[in-house]
Amino acid sequence: MSALPVVLVPVGVDDDALDACLAALDAGTPAGTRVWLADDAQAGPRGLAIVERWLARTALQADYTRRPRSIGEAAHLDDMLKACGDVDVLVLSSDAVPCPGWANQLAACAARDPAIATATPWCNAGETAAWPRVGEVMPVPDEPARLARAAATLPPHHPELPAAVDHALFLRGSARRKAGGLDAASYASSYVALIDLSLRMAGLGWRNALCETAFVARRGEGRPLGDDVETLGVRWPTWHARLAQFLMQDPLHALRASLGHAFENAELRTQPDLFGDAGENEHAAGEDAAGEGAA
């Protein structure tokens, strides 16, 4: 496969979640993949220390930028996307924990169908893309590598989702440009702004697909800000009913069950715990530094 799209990580305020995200990103993404950590003046002193230490150690081609003052969640992501021009990107929430192979699977999904504008992986807190039960927030999985292997065995049909979900997604640059990009003037949260963008792209004939061969975990669902939900309902009057119908009918039930069977049959291997104590990475880094000083 050719070089993967650049991974965009808007840095959040949760230091523990950021630590877990970066550890999993490093472990589950091919070395040399381009990563942009963009901080809308959110990270505190501990978060900055986590980022600095990670940048010094990662095998990824990573950069970090920080605004002197916050401009808001949706506006910040919009600026990141504009800076990337028309190129395809992978947007990863900083409280998400990608399972091994996630980036390759999302890129492969998009390559199979040029009509795909967004591709969203499974998630334990993924709303319409949730597993094991639709619309429910479940605990972060204990065996991420095993789950990733199970997902990778599913036939890649990439069924339709009502809209993109913000835990992680592939975003096609050409589709974003034709749809006009994020509407940061109308929405405060990137969560709802991405839904609006994906609905506009669908209106232009593009697809919002499930990448059933990838899994990205998360501690909780994305959240709207301010009047985002009301604004979305005014612009898209049928959206809430359509979403409710999807959740009630659960058209992905059989596919979700297939992932469950694949997980049960996947080979159990010993893997590093990417979802353990959030301070584990900092503790290990401290031990390494102590060892270097003793040497």
Image: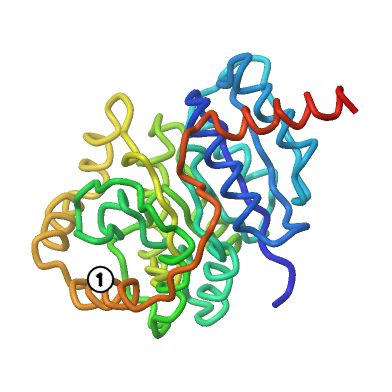
Residue 73 versus residue 170 in the image, above or below: above
- At a point 30% along the width and 48% down the height, the residue shown is 125
**Residue 60 vs residue 111, the one in the foreground:** 60
- 208 sits left or right of 173 in the view: left
**Residue 283 vs residue 130, the one in the foreground:** 283
Which quarter of the rendered picture does the C terminus lie within? top right
- At a point 58% along the width and 21% down the height, the residue shown is 43
**Residue 75 vs residue 158, the one in the foreground:** 158
- 199 sits left or right of 268 in the view: left
The location of residue 272, given as percent across then percent down, is: 55, 52
- 98 sits left or right of 83 in the view: left
The location of residue 109, given as percent across then percent down, is: 51, 75
Which quarter of the rendered picture does the N terminus lie within? bottom right
The location of residue 284, given as percent across then percent down, is: 65, 33
Residue pushed farthest right?
295
- At a point 50% along the width and 29% down the height, the residue shown is 16
Pointer 1: residues within 10 angstroms few (<14), some, or many (20+)? many
Q: Which residue is mark 1?
A: 256
The location of residue 273, given as percent across then percent down, is: 50, 48
**Residue 38 vs residue 75, the one in the foreground:** 38
Residue pushed farthest front?
294
- At a point 30% along the width and 24% down the height, the residue shown is 226
